[in-house]
Amino acid sequence: MKLVLLSGGSGKRLWPLSNDSRSKQFLKVLHDPDGRPESMVQRVWRQLGQVNLADSAYLATGRAQVEMIQSQLGPEVPIIVEPERRDTFPAIALTAAYLYSVEGVSPETAVAILPVDPYVEDAFFHTVSSLEDTLGQSGANLALIGVVPNHASEKYGYIIPADGGNEAKAVDGADAADGAQALDNVSFMPVGRFQEKPSEEAARELIGQGALWNCGVFAFRLGYLLDILQAKGLPLQYEELQRQYKLLAKISFDYEVVEKEPNIVVVPYDGYWKDLGTWNTLTEEMANPQLGKGTMTVDSSSSCLINELDIPVAVIGAPDLIVAASPDGILVTQKDASPRVKEVLKSFEQRPMYEERRWGHYRVVDYIQYDDGSKVLTKRIFVHAGRNISYQLHNKRCEVWTLVSGQAKVILNEKMHDVRAGDVVRIPEGTKHSILAVTDVEFIEVQTGPELVEEDNIRICMDWDDIVLHQFIS
């Protein structure tokens, strides 16, 4: 079986730490078993390794997240890249084409799709791996996982089994005793219908009918989805589907496929599962209520402070608050009110002020636009030892680098230079340039020009060995 983790989207529900470049799954606010900071995507990838599923797993994501995934999981992690963001059906369609035409995966192979950010125990992934047997035993076209609810929630969609879940069947062929309660035998039930985010009262009634939370996990035979693509006149070749990607409708896999499929079963999961999509749910799983520089007084009980800035933040006599500070902004909210962040900021737009890349990370320190149209952007950039920034040039801006710490090698128009803390590197527009960190390196970059945009990054090559080869060839 192949596993595909969907890592798409961005949002403001965890602003100011999340932005258009850094989604919630990349925030390092959790801790691994050794107490080190860990993001949601790092946690899930670690768990897959612990249950021996990482070798058959892929991540499907947009171009904007590729470098951040490589930064957190390593350069060798298998990634299926979407040309642009177009919801989950196009993403899964592209994934199917990749597995079939690039990886040579058999149409008979089971494929499980799951979000990249579930907060679960390892047992959840054993249930995921059981979906392959579920497809075989049930003869269904789709097999879902439904979480057994522990309360009536308005936040989740619900899967309602046919006949109230009383016809559960065990994968090993034995009769299951009672729907969701038969989880120990990895039971499955036919799906009757779905309900999106009901009221609390309606949710309570659905749970009485055996309804389960829809956690966005489903499995199918690869050939099932390939047949759907062919029926829609879509190519099965990955590169061709990439070229036609912008023509695909922006629609979820649930609406386009799942809710139209009559032959579906669901496997109940009666274990710990949580959606860490808001500040109040995320902070409940933080090992320490304070991250970053600052202090909280003892009469600030149940408050959380997350500070990514270099200046201290003090929380005094303020219980049940979330205080989050980053280069993108500062949030102060009561815990219960934190889900309103997205609504309050829906008309607020600004460029991301912090980004992680495959080589390190940067923060925007200052941005100024003058009356004559010229702009100045100042970044504080950190590059890990042994990593390099791509060999690139810019046609609409010049840059000045001031080395703050560490030692590095810089190439300017095919000429190599050794630099260290205190050195200044001037890069006029049109100059090909790259930097390799010999040790951890930090430098201040000042960009000046009429357009300071990502589209003006013209990359020539990425790997340092290729850059050096390019130097000698030129």
Image (spheres, helix red, strand yellow):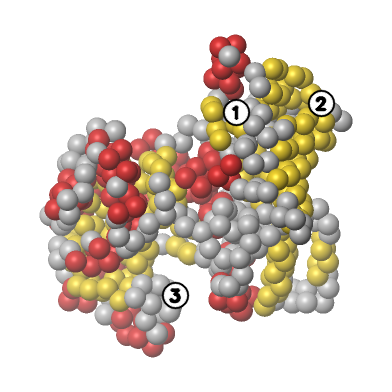
Q: Quadrant of the N terminus?
A: top left
Mark toward the start of the polypeptide (1 vs 3): 3
- Kindly indicate whether the residue at mark 3 contacts the one at mark 2 (C-beta within 8 angstroms): no
Mark toward the start of the polypeptide (2 vs 3): 3
Which residue sits furthest top? 472
**Mark 2 against mark 3, which lies toward the viewer?**
2
The Cα–Cα distance between marks 1 and 2, rounded to whole angstroms, is 19 Å
**Mark 1 against mark 2, which lies toward the viewer?**
1
Q: Amino acid at mark 1?
A: Tyr
Mark toward the start of the polypeptide (1 vs 2): 1
**Mark 1 against mark 3, which lies toward the viewer?**
1
Residue 335 lies in what quarter of the image?
A: bottom right
Total marks shown come to 3
Identify the mark at residue 155; answer none if there is no mark: 3
Residue 105 sits above or below residue 113 on the image: above
Q: Nearer the viewer, residue 307 or 93?
A: 93
Residue plotted at (22% across, 42% down): 236
Q: Which residue is mark 1?
A: 391
Q: Can residue 223 be seen from the camera position used here? A: yes
Q: Is residue 417 left or right of residue 452?
A: right
Q: How crowded is the residue under tag 2: few (<14 C-alpha within 10 Å), some, or many (20+)?
A: many
The Cα–Cα distance between marks 2 and 3, rounded to whole angstroms, is 52 Å
Q: Amino acid at mark 3?
A: Lys
